Amino acid sequence: MMNWPINTVDGVGEKLKEQLEEIGIKTVQDLLFYFPNRYENYEIKPLSELIHDEKVTIEGQVIGDPIVTYYGRKKSRLVLRIQVEHAIVKGVMFNRPFAKKQLEPGDIVTLTGKWDQHRLQITVEQYKKGKAKTDQPIQPVYYVKQPIKSFQLKKIIKKALAQYEGQIDELLPSTYLTSYKLLTRVKALQEIHFPTSFQALKQAKRRFIYEELLLFQLKMQLLRKNNRERTQGNSQLFDLALVNQFIDKLPFQLTKAQNRSLQEILQDMRSPYRMNRLLQGDVGSGKTAVAAISLYASVIAGKQGAIMVPTEILAEQHMLSLQALFGEDVSIALLTGSVKGKKRKEILAMVEKKSINIIVGTHALIQEDVHFANLGTVIVDEQHRFGVNQRKALRDKGIDPDVLFMTATPIPRTLAITSFGDMDVSQIDEMPVGRKPVETYWVKDNMLTRVLQFIQKEVEQGFQAYVICPLIEESDKLDIQNAVDLYQQLQEAYSSYQIDVGLLHGRLHNDEKEEVMQQFASNQVQVLVSTTVVEVGVNVPNATVMVIYDAERFGLSQLHQLRGRVGRGNAQSYCILIADPKGDVGKERMKIMTETTNGFELAEQDLQLRGPGDFFGKKQSGLPEFKVADIVQDYRALETARNDAQSIVYNQLLTKDTNYQVLNKYLKQTFNDGEVTFD
């Protein structure tokens, strides 16, 4: 696969080899796929086709002597006039007085720079005497380190292409090359390095976008297939009639989306392969009900179930919810860090003897002394709050138990395909009937008094409110509201109204956090001032108001998560965004938040505004880095590549294709010296 050392290319000696290796070019493959980071356009167009404020190249004849004026210390401005077609164009150069001696009346010159349509003026970045090159008007520019020059790298790439052209393997199956009208790999490499036209460059990029995405999706699908088939699974053979009887007894009717997701999960549980599924659904969409039915199916199959959540209060809330749904039919226990001593030993003994069917807990579930008799299903709620090792530790408590991850953070489709491509994904994308959408308003700081009066009115009717701000304490760097100051202000504002104000932030000890949340959950505290630690894992149906200070500092998905803390009861709820964004993106966020309560729509728009790295946070995004592809802009190509990868891996549609062996060989080299293959 072109893994020859870089010094096999003509003209690359030992010194140049070392310099190339410093920028990551060690083989011929590395060299040919070291793509330009941008292109300079030296195409000569008629003046009528030039676009204002864009970089252009023009060619004309110098009229009169250039004029140089000096200003400041060692600063100069040179102006020359050139005739282009039937017009006189002014060229302006800064700090290049020496050009006056080089450019004389009658000279033909080529100027490249920023075009001012209104003044018929070009601010010159580059100039040269003589006519423009017409053989290759689009010039690639590469990222290089001294002493290597961009033109030098271009020269080496040209030699390598000529030398190894006949040995460049075609990876894409001919079926797809034909149906998608893609350039061959050789032709695409030539055009991406030495484009003959913008249309040819576009087609070269289109080919490599698809290639990158297909290869990535093939890896993901192969991992998924091999992980699935490598594990024995536990084939949970439950009586479907009993599961349906349980569903019929529920005090609510499942939505179509809940039913669809549930059927996908139950099918996984009955299969001989281990379930590895992500269940994503908006706040309040009914994921817990689907999880409860899945756990019930595991129990009637003679297995045990476990559900792990990030906080003790959420564990307690899940425990109460499950007890209300199951009644006396299923034995449930709670295991958190607060459960200690004799009580903990009793619970552990009952779990090991299978006297307990379902255990709900925090990270306490993954301690070494927790042993299950027959663990069938593991559910991890708010999965992104746990590390990979924590999730694995719970999975390893059973012999290949089925695993369901849940998240209330709606993930855009493209990120779900990319980040969770090795998992099956179920999506609950509709809300239960009768749930009132949260009314959302955007106000400026000058409305603060009215906002506080509104909170007071809601509290007097027996309801509660959250007030969220970004920082814990005052910061010199950022002029934004902070939780400690705000807490003190609200205490003072409500001191004569018998309204108790609480404070919650990340620097409190876990026990202190739990205590504050318990006080809020039991309505001992009516107004809770908090940082974003309440974003996940709190269910207080009595809370009807969510006020978010400096809302422009949050992404859409985070704002939506915070908004999801209210609207959990039967009363109408409200979200008030206090923000004064200076930029267009911040204003657009506020506008979008007031227009929709659909988390999946918001997630897609957030991705467009922020980009994939910022959506997850660059450090933990785990997103692949593509050379050409962009998962936001190229989402159609991503979905096509995913579907094609599934066809190749699961249906083996291309076994007779002439390029199939090459693709298989490439994947074998990529995966553990050939352990993974779709033969």
Image: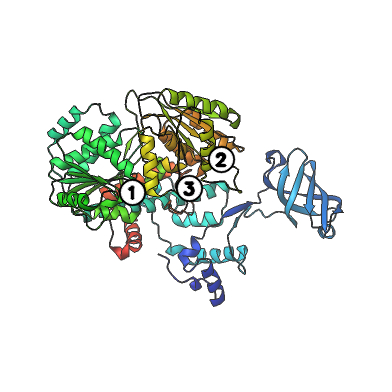
Describe residue 361's horizontal placement relative to residue 48 as left or right.
left
Alpha carbons under labels 3 and 2: distance apart: 36 Å
- The image shows residue 245, relative to residue 218, as above or below, that is above
| The C terminus sits in image quarter | bottom left
Frontmost of labels 1 and 2 is: 2
Disc 2, SS: loop
- The image shows residue 626, relative to residue 300, as above or below, that is below
* Residue 449 % position (x, y): 57, 27
> Which of these two is toward me, 452 or 352?
452
What amino acid type is highlighted by mark number 3? Asp
Q: Which residue is label 3 attached to?
A: 630
Alpha carbons under labels 1 and 3: distance apart: 18 Å
Which of the marked residues, 1 or 3, is nearer the chain's N terminus? 3
Give the quarter of the image for residue 481. top right
What amino acid type is highlighted by mark number 1? Ala
Residue drawn 57% across and 46% down? Answer: 474
Residue 657 visible: no
Which of the marked residues, 1 or 2, is nearer the chain's N terminus? 2
Q: Which residue is label 1 attached to?
A: 645
Disc 1, SS: helix
